[in-house]
Image (spheres, rainbow, N blue to C red):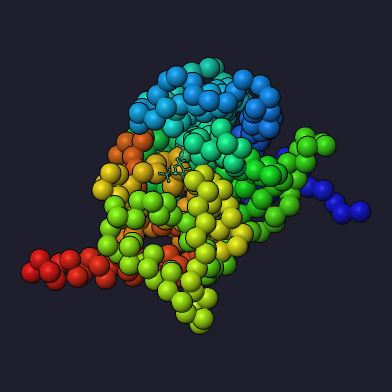
Amino acid sequence: MTKVTTLGQFIIEKQADFPYAKGELSRLLRDIGIAAKIVNREVNKAGLVDILGDNGTTNIQGEGQKKLDVYADEQFISALRSGGECCVVASEEHDDCIFINSKISQNAKYIVCIDPLDGSSNIDVNVSVGTIFSIYRRTTTDGPAQIDEILQKGERQVAAGYVIYGSSTMLVYTTGKGVNGFTLDPSIGEFCLSHPNMTIPSRGTIYSINEGNYTKFPQGVKDYIKYCQVEDAMSDRPFTSRYIGSMVADIHRNLIKGGIFLYPTTSSHPNGKLRLMYECNPLAFVIEQAGGKATDGHRRIMEIEPHHLHQRTPIFIGSSEMVEKVEAFVRLSDTQLIGAAD
Ligand SMILES: O=P(O)(O)OC[C@H]1O[C@](O)(COP(=O)(O)O)[C@@H](O)[C@@H]1O
Ligand SMILES: [Mg+2]
Ligand SMILES: [Mg+2]
């Protein structure tokens, strides 16, 4: 019989990598795992219970909230609040940070940024959705946490990961020492280690982008898409186009098979669409830890200075050689633009 390692057991074993750890991060990851199971239960019942559809409210970015967006947000915040290891939560669904002022939490050392439900537009049609989380350590030690403690660069993350609610439910995370994936075994209600030491192939044959926006893309991205579509046996082109529209699901597939996910600037989203703090940074940390790359076309996502909670960024993320290739196209087009202006 093969040995089963649950997420809880794995987290405790890995605590030994950090000799001075007191178990707070382990407990925080456990709390996220618990909330993920609760959200999973509701996602699985969607269609049977009244949880599909719009909530009738909008979030800070003016996007309509789905009932499941609101439900997932409440579950994660409540698990983090009662777990006591997190003093501030920054969520896609709230304009401002949520300071947890309970006696046990106010001196907690961790800050969590979260996209409670990623891929909202897919909820009502039974397509995979996800949760993305990012964990930072506070930069001061006492008193209530301040806003600038939350706005840290992605390279300062101590842990990050995602949950994918798909044909099976998985939790994938990193603490900066590789990436491990756990599949929820519904018969025992536990996430079990199923994908140890995940690595992303350095090249793949999948590109993921919302091609409907093609005319709005910068020239370098248009040129890269054309490159993906050209026939060339040596480099396995034309590549396959796959776009689910849930960032977590697109990136999870590319992590396993190799590929690139692109959400560039567009004329309607001049700063990009996806959010730095709770979408791009955590996924960049996971993908880099798996051996891939994540940039905005010019610099590492995790080196971008955040100025506000809901800041957006363009992103090119996935297999290292593919990200380098799109960067080369972007650079070339920038030089041509400069040349034409001279
Ligand atoms: O519909 P578009 O513009 O292609 O955007 C799809 C992207 O938007 C998102 O759904 C945004 O996430 P939320 O659902 O959390 O707002 C990503 O998951 C996805 O990659
Ligand atoms: Mg999202
Ligand atoms: Mg969301």
The spot of residue 253 in percent (x, y) is 59, 55
Q: Is residue 253 visible?
A: yes
In the image, farthest residue toward the top: 102
In the image, farthest residue toward the bottom: 234
Q: Compared with residue 89, is residue 339 higher up or lower down, i.e. above or below?
A: below
Residue at the image point whose x is 51% and y is 39% from the top = 119
Residue at the image point whose x is 15% and y is 67% from the top = 338
The spot of residue 31 in percent (x, y) is 64, 31
The spot of residue 132 in percent (x, y) is 53, 40
The reply, left or right, for residue 223 in relation to residue 200 is: left
The spot of residue 49 in percent (x, y) is 66, 21
The reply, left or right, for residue 24 in relation to residue 277 is: right
Report which quarter residue 139 is drawn in.
Answer: top left
Q: Compared with residue 80, is residue 162 higher up or lower down, i.e. above or below?
A: below
The reply, left or right, for residue 79 in relation to residue 239 is: right
Residue at the image point whose x is 42% and y is 27% from the top = 64
Tally of marks:
0
Q: Is residue 38 visible?
A: no
Q: Compared with residue 254, is residue 138 higher up or lower down, i.e. above or below?
A: above
255 or 48, which is in the foreground?
A: 48
Residue at the image point whose x is 53% and y is 25% from the top = 53
Q: In what quadrant of the picture does the C terminus appear?
A: bottom left
In the image, farthest residue toward the left: 342
255 or 88, which is in the foreground?
A: 255
